[in-house]
């Protein structure tokens, strides 16, 4: 059985990016092959922690792992095409450089041809009601984000001009420097890893290739959505630098607590207090359900506190399915308060007329207790 990735790094499942990086840095320095020459076990551990960090630092891969575990990256999953669990020589180099590059003069810049960089992923927190989770909805949200500059079309250069190749790194975005016995490669200090220099920047975006703006987006909330679900809108994140690809937007959903219903998966639970006389004599009452209708519950004579009644098909719809959960009504019995003199007299009279047959549970309990403790 493959080891849990969070356990491999020694972090909780709620760990943020900073905690992941800190945990990996400590373990990588401890188990790096250069510090443990000839130690096969240390090399194996280093590969495991590198692999775990590669997946958990990426929001999309982490979301897939949280939902499907290791299976998300097997048999043609996200691992296909080099996007998943595989970490070759280049992969370990990239991860190690990502963590320790800042110690050598700045963190690694992820860039593509021409100095283009992928935009950051964005997060949007959305709270919906249980009724909205039941029926689904299309929500309109406004997200402040960076978009491609419409003047320079994302190049960062003034219209009519174009970026020039960096003379320091010859367009590679990396420079090498000798440190003792090692040759260390780090981000080019002149172009900051972009490989190009913009000598005449765009007036509107100041060479960034993007501007800040608030956008209106439509988000489809499917019926049956659960609290904590994350919805990904591909390409709706921050625009990339200098025409680079946009990041993704992640919608984190939370469902507000309901006044009457508690949810457990597709099932709903509702506690209903009834009077002592209704429980004793029987009766009926109506409950409102999330589908906008009312359902009648029949209470038989002698109903006890804690009794549950099941209303089939009155729960929550199962996401992307035709199935529907059930609604469970749990009975609570309310003891009368602020009794009048006449009410007290009637209850005392009722108590005097009661027998063990009227209260078999309490009578049986105290009888068993006397026998157990041998009490006269």
Image (tube, rainbow, N blue to C red):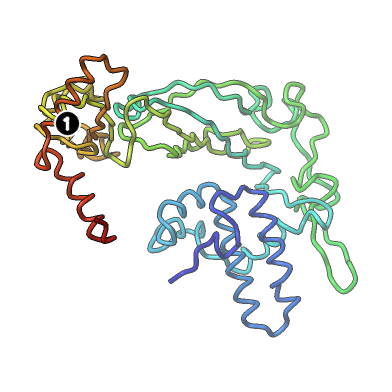
Query: Is 277 on the left-hand or right-hand side of 142?
Result: left
**Closer to us: 359 or 232:** 359
Q: In this view, does 170 lie above or below 359?
A: below
Outermost residue toward the right in this view: 180
The image quarter in which residue 118 lies: top right
Query: Is 23 on the left-hand or right-hand side of 230?
Result: right
Q: Mark 1 points at which residue?
A: 351
* Residue beneath the point at 42% across and 23% down: 139
Q: In which quarter of the image is the N terminus?
A: bottom left
Query: Is 175 on the left-hand or right-hand side of 354?
Result: right
SS type, badge 1? helix
**Closer to us: 64 or 334:** 334
Residue 212 place in picture, x, y as percent: 66, 24
Query: Is 175 on the left-hand or right-hand side of 245?
Result: right
* Residue beneath the point at 20% across and 31% down: 314
**Closer to us: 148 or 65:** 65
């Amino acid at each position: 059985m493959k080891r849990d990735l969070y356990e491999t790094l020694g972090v909780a499942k709620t760990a943020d990016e900073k905690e992941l990086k800190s945990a990996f840095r400590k373990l990588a320095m401890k188990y790096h092959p250069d510090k443990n020459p000839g130690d096969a076990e240390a090399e194996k551990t280093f590969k495991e922690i590198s692999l775990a960090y590669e997946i958990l630092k990426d929001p999309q891969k982490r979301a897939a792992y949280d939902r499907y575990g290791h299976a998300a990256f097997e048999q043609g999953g996200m691992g296909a095409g080099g996007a998943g669990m595989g970490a070759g020589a280049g992969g370990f180099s990239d991860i190690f450089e990502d963590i320790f590059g800042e110690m050598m003069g700045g963190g690694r810049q992820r860039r593509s041809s021409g100095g283009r960089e992928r935009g950051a992923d964005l997060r949007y927190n959305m709270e919906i009601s249980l009724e909205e989770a039941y029926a689904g909805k299309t929500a309109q949200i406004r997200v402040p984000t960076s978009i491609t500059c419409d003047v320079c079309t994302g190049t960062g250069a003034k219209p009519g001009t174009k970026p020039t190749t960096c003379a320091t790194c010859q367009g590679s975005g990396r420079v090498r420097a000798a440190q003792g016995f090692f040759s260390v490669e780090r981000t080019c200090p002149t172009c900051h890893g972009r490989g190009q220099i913009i000598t005449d920047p765009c007036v509107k975006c100041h060479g960034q290739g993007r501007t800040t703006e608030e956008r209106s987006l439509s988000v489809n909330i499917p019926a049956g959505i659960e609290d904590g679900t994350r919805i990904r809108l591909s390409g709706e994140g921050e625009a990339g630098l200098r025409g680079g690809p946009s990041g993704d937007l992640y919608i984190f959903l939370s469902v507000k607590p309901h006044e009457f219903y508690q949810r457990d998966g597709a099932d709903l639970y509702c506690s209903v207090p009834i009077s002592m006389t209704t429980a004793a004599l029987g009766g009926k009452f109506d409950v409102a359900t999330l589908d906008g209708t009312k359902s009648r519950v029949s209470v038989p004579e002698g109903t006890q506190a804690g009794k549950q009644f099941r209303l089939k098909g009155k729960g929550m719809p199962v996401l992307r399915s035709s199935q529907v959960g059930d609604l469970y009504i749990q009975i609570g019995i309310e003891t009368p308060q602020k009794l009048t003199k006449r009410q007290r007299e009637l209850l005392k009279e009722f108590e005097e007329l009661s027998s063990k047959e009227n209260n078999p549970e309490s009578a049986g309990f105290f009888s068993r207790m006397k026998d157990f403790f041998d009490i006269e």
